[in-house]
């Protein structure tokens, strides 16, 4: 075990003791023996959803006495209900150190202008702590206020000799456009300026490079949230490194039930190892990310993170899925790059509204072709008049900055709403399965089947819930539920006989049902082999296949399957136990 992993294990055990002091987690973890759960068993613990945080209220996941807190922040979601975050003095110091990990490397010679909004949001305060810890001078030039409009910020940068600016990516773009409107030359008028730190919005690589071209300095990305503080920082090689001393990050598939394959986009699940005031355990924050191992020449090791956007902005066109990063890639590879843009989702494609002071260099034909090629969907384009997306007159006056809307989602039709509701019911049910709340999962899957009786997925997942309830039930309960399990499997396979998940549940039924009631380990083995051939390659599946061969008295094949399971998950307890039994018997 590496030193880093040992330290994470120690912090994880400490977290489990601390977090159960909060009302939310005291209830969520009541049924778990947290004293005997190791870090490698973290997936046995329940997820925490955004909805749960909002429903818990301001004090719901506060894990320390109110006297120990130093600061309170809120993050507003799409529902308008805030998510609370509390910070002790130690938390704020840790947050500053997290920001300080950035490749900008602040020094006592730096003058740092902070352009993040100060009202209730977190990044401004953490950046201020990072600046103070480095001995730098801070200039608090908050956005979204009339006190520091764009011209005044530029005047401050010039007059004070600001060296580093930190703020939302959009603020960096708008300040550059204001400088152009005022006739300023960024290189000659801001000679001391050396770097930008950006956070609070999605910053795809083409967008980051665009801002670097606007300002002629490196741009360092920071990834985090109000609920968690800063999670990853960008080094001078342009790699976003996870701060593994403070966070455990899992990347799960869309329903939150199993890990995404390495390199595939999945959903961030965050555990805050060191946060004291309002710690989080397996927080499913609906951000879409990848994490891959990295040994960077900057000296960092561990995971590198790429952020692709949020679930609420994801768009689907048949089998095609587009995330916010895909939209940004298409927009910020236009030449020239727009000064402002907005995309509107439509039934059969996307409508872009674009604004540039160099729009005479565009043709609708070329822009449409570029966007359509990059995104793989039909595209229409509109070149906006001044003031529609960007009011340049306001930029050079004392008007406060505003929160932009980049992606306008389509209002769902009745049919689309039904599909979305089905997907939501299945997602909620799968998360309840992951939390081992099988009764709640069954209820949600029953609603999904009632909504769409022709959904093979809905029937298969309802069968899975019945299977889990049968495993946990007494003999009479098992006998009562078995016909329901069989009926749902039959329904799923009748709708889609090739659905791997339905075949897997059928295999589990055939394996775990007594021969007198229709069990058949040989048929079960065929079902599991089919699933593996279709790309379902988890350790649990190989263990199930191994169990089939044990029942069929074929120890050689059983050992092979169990070794395959351990190759995928070296600490799989059931695989190790079964293999030891086989080795002991032969």
Image (cartoon, rainbow, N blue to C red):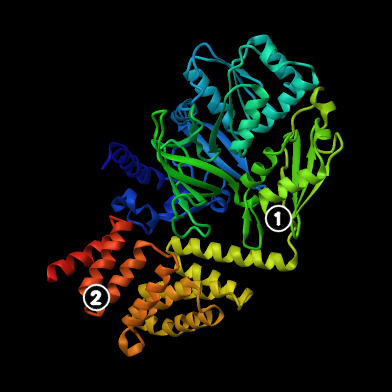
Q: Is residue 142 left or right of residue 94?
A: right
| Image: 12 above or below 414 | above
Name which residue lies at 84% across and 34% down.
360
For label 1, the residue is: 377
Q: Nearer the viewer, residue 485 or 80?
A: 485
Q: Nearer the viewer, residue 62 or 342?
A: 342
Residue, far bottom: 516
Q: Residues within 10 Å of mark 2 (few under 14, many from 20)?
A: some
Q: Is residue 38 left or right of residue 206?
A: left
Is residue 119 something one can see in this rendering? no
Quadrant of the rendering where the N terminus is positioned = top left
For label 2, the residue is: 550
Work out how far the residue at label 2 is from the one at label 1, CA to CA, in angstroms: 51 Å
The spot of residue 77 in percent (x, y) is 64, 46
The spot of residue 309 in percent (x, y) is 60, 46
Name which residue lies at 85% across and 26% down.
393
Q: Is residue 146 left or right of residue 272?
A: right
Q: Where, by quadrant of the figure, is residue 114 drawn?
A: top right
SS for dot 2: helix
Please identify, in this view, whether the residue under mark 2 or under mark 1 is nearer the observer. 1
Q: Which mark is residue 413?
A: none
Name the N-terminal-most of marks 2 and 1.
Answer: 1
Name which residue lies at 44% across and 59% down.
258
| Image: 198 above or below 381 | above
Quadrant of the rendering where the C terminus is positioned = bottom left
SS for dot 1: loop
The spot of residue 462 in percent (x, y) is 50, 74
Q: Where, by quadrant of the figure, is residue 4 drawn?
A: top left
Q: Are marks 2 and 1 in contact (CB under 8 Å)?
A: no
Q: Nearer the viewer, residue 288 or 446?
A: 288
The spot of residue 325 in percent (x, y) is 62, 44
Q: Residues within 10 Å of mark 1 (few under 14, many from 20)?
A: some
């Amino acid at each position: 075990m590496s030193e880093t992993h040992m330290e994470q294990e120690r912090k994880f055990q400490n977290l489990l003791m601390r977090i159960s002091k909060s009302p939310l987690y005291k209830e969520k973890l009541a049924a778990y023996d947290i004293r005997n759960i190791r870090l490698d068993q973290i997936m046995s613990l329940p997820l925490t959803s955004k909805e749960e945080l909002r429903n818990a209220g301001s004090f719901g996941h506060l894990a320390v006495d109110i006297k120990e807190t130093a600061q309170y922040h809120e993050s507003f979601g799409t529902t308008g209900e805030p998510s609370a975050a509390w910070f002790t003095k130690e938390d704020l110091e840790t947050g500053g150190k997290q920001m300080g990990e950035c490749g900008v490397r602040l020094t006592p010679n730096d003058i740092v202008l902070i352009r993040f909004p100060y009202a209730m949001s977190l990044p401004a305060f953490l950046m201020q702590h990072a600046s103070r810890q480095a001995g730098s001078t801070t200039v608090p030039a908050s956005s979204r206020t009339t006190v520091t409009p764009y011209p005044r910020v530029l005047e401050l940068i010039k007059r004070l000799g600001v060296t580093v600016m930190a703020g939302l990516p959009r603020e960096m773009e708008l300040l550059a456009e204001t400088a152009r409107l005022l006739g300023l030359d960024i290189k000659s008028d801001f000679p001391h300026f050396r770097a930008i730190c950006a956070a609070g919005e999605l910053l795809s690589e083409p967008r980051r490079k665009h801002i670097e071209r606007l300002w002629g300095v490196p741009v360092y990305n920071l990834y985090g949230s109000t609920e968690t503080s800063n999670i990853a920082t960008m080094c001078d090689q342009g790699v976003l490194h996870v701060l593994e001393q403070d966070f455990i990050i899992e990347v799960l598939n869309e329903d939150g039930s199993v890990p995404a394959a390495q390199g595939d986009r999945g959903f961030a699940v965050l555990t805050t190892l060191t946060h004291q005031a309002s710690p989080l355990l397996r927080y499913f924050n609906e951000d879409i990310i990848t994490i891959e191992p990295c040994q960077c020449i900057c000296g960092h090791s561990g995971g590198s993170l790429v952020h692709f956007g949020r679930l609420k902005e994801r768009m689907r066109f048949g089998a095609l899925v587009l995330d916010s990063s895909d939209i940004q890639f298409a927009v910020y590879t236009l030449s020239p790059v727009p000064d402002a843009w907005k995309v509107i989702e439509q039934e059969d494609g996307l409508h872009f509204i674009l604004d540039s002071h160099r729009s005479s260099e565009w043709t609708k034909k070329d822009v449409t072709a570029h966007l359509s090629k990059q995104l793989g969907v039909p595209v229409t384009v509109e070149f906006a008049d001044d003031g529609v997306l960007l009011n340049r007159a306001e930029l050079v006056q004392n008007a406060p900055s505003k929160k932009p809307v980049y992606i306008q989602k389509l209002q769902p039709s009745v049919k689309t709403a039904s599909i979305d509701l089905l997907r939501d019911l299945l997602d909620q049910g799968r998360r309840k399965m992951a939390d081992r709340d099988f009764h709640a999962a069954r209820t949600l899957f029953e609603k999904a089947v009632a909504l769409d009786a022709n959904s093979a997925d809905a029937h298969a997942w309802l069968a899975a819930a019945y299977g889990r309830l049968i495993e946990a039930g007494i003999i009479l309960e098992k006998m009562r539920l078995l016909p329901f399990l069989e009926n749902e499997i039959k329904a799923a396979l009748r709708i889609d006989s090739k659905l791997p998940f339905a075949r897997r549940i059928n295999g589990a039924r055939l394996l775990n049902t007594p021969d007198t009631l229709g069990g058949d380990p040989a048929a079960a083995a065929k079902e599991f082999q089919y699933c593996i051939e279709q790309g379902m390659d988890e350790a649990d599946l190989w263990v199930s296949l191994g169990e089939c061969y044990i029942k069929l008295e074929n120890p050689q094949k059983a050992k092979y399957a169990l070794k395959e399971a351990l190759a995928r998950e070296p600490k799989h307890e059931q695989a190790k136990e079964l293999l030891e039994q086989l080795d002991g018997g032969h």
